[in-house]
Image (tube, rainbow, N blue to C red):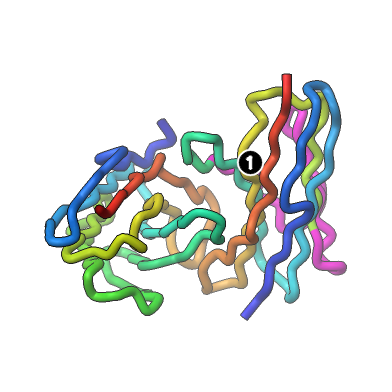
Amino acid sequence: GIQVEQSPPDLILQEGANSTLRCNFSDSVNNLQWFHQNPWGQLINLFYIPSGTKQNGRLSATTVATERYSLLYISSSQTTDSGVYFCAVVIYGQNFVFGPGTRLSVLP
Amino acid sequence: ETGVTQTPRHLVMGMTNKKSLKCEQHLGHNAMYWYKQSAKKPLELMFVYNFKEQTENNSVPSRFSPECPNSSHLFLHLHTLQPEDSALYLCASSQEVQNNYGYTFGSGTRLTVV
């Protein structure tokens, strides 16, 4: 089946810093989504981005489907950005395959 | 709230107990999912329901028994669990299995088996 890798596995930032999280996947996909899991376990859908670039406030994401990767950018990070960021991909008709996640800690 | 509500939020149960987890969605979705998230492991898909019919069971032990009485409600019945079953159990829903747009998770039930 499709493999999903994320890097880095862990990231520690000072508040106000910028960061880039990467997701690589091993096959063509029909859908890619980024999720944020907060420290209380809640998973929030950040972006639905099978290709192209989207922005939402301090967050933006880019997927280059032909090269099988996606990037999540976090600018001017805040302590509330802490948690685990998951990339999940799906091939049409199948279920999501989640990556292992990047654990982000933003220090005040 | 995301539109997907899970109860209880926390559950401690003995290995001989029987308990149930509940998930309810108010989004008009037709697909519902159970996931297990153990410490330091990726999310594991357990069961998938599409229009109330189970479409996927990822080799889950029979001590976990799902029930989907309608498209808005999903249960996970638990009996004779093991300590390694302690984990965060997440419910999710989407428009349909073939349409992942609008994929929404609940807040999860943190289960501890003692």
Name the outermost residue toward the top.
Answer: A108
- At a point 56% along the width and 61% down the height, the residue shown is B42
Q: Is residue A8 left or right of residue B89?
A: right
Q: Which residue is mark 1?
A: A46
Residue B58 seen: yes
Q: Position of residue A47 (x, y in %)?
A: 66, 44
Q: What is the tally of numbered marks visible in this picture?
A: 1
Q: Amino acid at mark 1?
A: Leu
Q: Is residue A79 above or below residue A70?
A: above
Q: Is residue B56 left or right of residue B12?
A: right
- At a point 17% along the width and 63% down the height, the residue shown is B79
Q: Is residue B98 above or below residue A15?
A: below
Callout 1: chain: A
Magenta residues (range): A44-69
Give the crowd class for mark 1: few <14, some 14-19, many >=20 residues within 10 Å.
some
Q: Is residue B39 left or right of residue A10?
A: left
- At a point 38% along the width and 59% down the height, the residue shown is B33
